[in-house]
Amino acid sequence: MEPILQFFYNLVPGLADLPLWIAATIVGAIVVVAMFTYIALFALIGIWLERKISGHMQDRLGPMEVGGWHGWAQTIADTVKLLLKEDIVPDKADKPLFRFAPILVFAAALSAFAAIPWSRSFIPANLNVGLLYILSISSLVVIGILMGGWASNNKWSLYGGMRAVAQIVSYEIPVSLSLIVAVLIAGTLDMQQIVLNQSGSILSWNVFRFFPFPFIAFFIYFIASLAEVNRTPFDLPEAESELVAGFQTEYSGMRWSFFMLAEYADMFVVAAIATTVFLGGWQAPFEFLTFIPAAFWFLGKALLIVFVQMWLRWTLPRLRVDQLMYTAWKVLTPFSFALIVFVSLWKIL
Amino acid sequence: MTAQEINDRIQNTFADSVLEFNDTVLQPYLKINPAKFYEVCQYLRDNEDMDFNFLNSVSGVDYGEDLGVVYHLYSMTRKHKIVLKVILPRENPQVSSIADLWRTADWHEREVYDLFGVVFLNHPNLRRILLPDDWEGYPLRKDYVQPETYNGIPVLHPDMRGDSK
Amino acid sequence: MKKDNLPAAQFEVEVPDTLKTEEMTLNMGPQHPSTHGVLRVVLKTDGEIIKSAEPVIGYLHRCFEKHAENVTWHQVIPFTDRLDYIASMNNNLGYVIGLERMMNLQVNERAEYLRVIVSELNRIASHLIALGTYGLDIGAFTPFLYVFRDRERILDLFEEICGARLLYNYIWVGGVAYDAPQGWRDKVLQFIDYFVPKIKEYNDILTYNKIFIDRTAKVGVIPADVAINYGLSGPSLRGSGVEFDLRKDDPYSIYDRFDFNVCTGKGQMGTVGDTWDRYWVRVAEMYESAKIVRQAAEQLPEGDAKETVPRNIKVPAGEYYMRTETPRGELGYYIISDGGKTPNRVKVRSPAYCNLSVLPAIAPGVMVADMVAIIGSLDIVLGEVDR
């Protein structure tokens, strides 16, 4: 986190005089709070946007009342409601696990933000295995979901939890394999290096290099990442019409909203990975557009992917469990293996 | 095939199976001897000229002195229909079930059992279907008196209760 | 019925003897998002695979048949509204025609045409809901709102003609409650012009969606003879390829004057009688209903549509089993009169009740998600199942 530390040293001169570990802790805390604020804000705006987008896709307006202009305060009001709601823990639930599950899910989602490069200088932790870190930390989510599903002592929740494990574990394979295609091109797992590797115009982004292999890998990644974050058409763990609400059935109020928050955070994380690895990260698409701040490009690209995620959700029906597994093991995984072979050959030749 | 022909065929095949035949009404009906009921039904379904493959409905009726079960049959292939009636005594009404001939009868017979108390012999699963399992009495009988409470819950409207104040 | 006619279970798991397994009993409903009301199904499952399913009904029992014995002939009509509350007009129609046949009553031409128009509009509205909620069951949310957008226009038409939007009490013995207001006929024709192209929109977003087809084709197959033996009717029967429609095969009202086809399932996407076929029959029937409405509205004669008999009628002693084709199938009223002012007995043969009874036969070997697809494709309304 040297660049960030340096940034804060310049901002607050006294900070540099402190021992490194104190300074690092202070800066780290600030960054975590900033990230948390960002996730909360993103969820607020994201949920509002999702409602508006779905509304307009469905020939209606979405929220229009709260706050005046196009119901902008709707999610804020909802959040207040959720915060004030009674926290119900079922009598027969496994209480410690039940309470801990949403925390774990959210913690995993939050930790993934540590290695996301927002711009040339702003990356909370510039790890040399950043991509590996994000992939592994975000698979913690599955433990939290299974925990919640099991601890609820509800058969529907259990179904949701089991489905989530089967689904997320299976889809991690195509996700990782399709990312390896890009890693092979970049030759590094360092998120910042992967971005820097794609400098230049839009044509030097990974999607368009070694055409068409990373291009296909991008689609495989996108499809598999939808399953990773339980979005339609892969929303089986919380399939409303089948499992009532899946692993969230017994949750209410604040704990439920943590699941919700984690879902939106995860949506952003997978979009951020796709942006970083395939779409040139914070780089501008053309040389002459570099005067616009890097964070704008990063956010713009990531939000575009989030929009497509929402778009699909309001268009497609849901798959069945066996079809879900079929897609993962018999379609996406073999294809990504083939892509790895082709790209490696191309690199060697 | 007209109702008259159906009646003749049944009477020729099964002696004293038809107790009464009436085709002066809107929909002609046959009153069948409860003892022969199952055989008649099987004949109506399996005979090629009859071919009654569709059971419209099974209805219980309270005739005052007796109970009755009315069966409406229809043939999709021959496009003819017939009404069968079985008259049963008020005490201990029993008739053989035809749920294995037409599966439609399965739930319909349960319903008649539920609301009229007619017992269908050899029915695979004769339990109450619309009312709770522990309901007492058979509500569609004309002499049914509605209980004031069910498991301690008042079920009558205050105006209808005897003790209304 | 021959047992071997039922299709083989879709999924089977073989468990080695050394492994201890237990079946799980899963209570689906009465509070569940996709049991279309208060249906409860007791499932025995092995993981996601269903071993047996037993519907438990009666949670919405409102004693219709007992009520009917205690009110006058006309007062039964509002109760019929509440049987199948999605298609109230069709429910009114069956009861009223039954009474008219017992009384040997002729109805004015204009009233007959209005009855057909409102019944077919209500059939469209009901099929729209079936489509939308079916999409919802499969996980597609958007078609649901598309169909409600168009159903809304039908409800507006109904509101204009009888003042109610859900429970109409419109068709009365001897006629209809109110004549159509001025300009109503043109609005109906405008609606049909607007509506028919919209069906393509549903097809684009739902019917021919690859995931939707994968979820529904070859699932919940009901062979024709099983369907007949279980007394299925309406789209659920026609989905199995049986060409049977009471509007053609046992005509009532003036349906014999109109040109329309009976739609059957042909197994386009999988097997004849699968859930997709039942769904498709409903889509195709909307075209046919629109055709009937257009013809009826164009031929609508001038004249009097109000009822021709006093409110307090007496029906001659006798009995009649009247069956009509509602959106869910054969709705039968078995009416017994002793010549008095109130019915002696009104028995309802509800189509959804019979359609639902086939569930235990086709459920074994499907997945929990398929269960939802099958229940949705039978298009039950619990108000009618439980009465």
Image: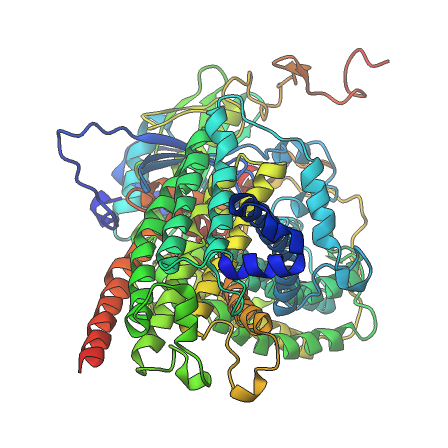
- Rendering coords of residue A22 (x, y %): 56, 43
Q: Is residue A113 left or right of residue A64?
A: left
Residue under the point 79% across and 55% down: A66
Answer with the quarter of the image where residue C112 lies.
Answer: bottom right
Asked whether A303 or B63 is in front, the reply is A303
- The residue furthest front is A17
x, y percentage for residue C94?
A: 61, 52
Closer to the camera in the image, C56 or C235: C56
Q: Is residue C354 above or below residue C221?
A: above
Q: Is residue A327 left or right of residue C187?
A: left
- What colour scheme has been applied to the protein in the rendered image? rainbow
The x, y position of residue A342, in whole percent, is 21, 76
Which residue is rendered at x = 46% and y = 36% of the image?
A148
Q: Is residue C257 visible?
A: no
On the picture, is C1 further left or further right than C205?
left
The residue lying toward the viewer, choosing from A278 and C34, is A278
Q: How many marks?
A: 0
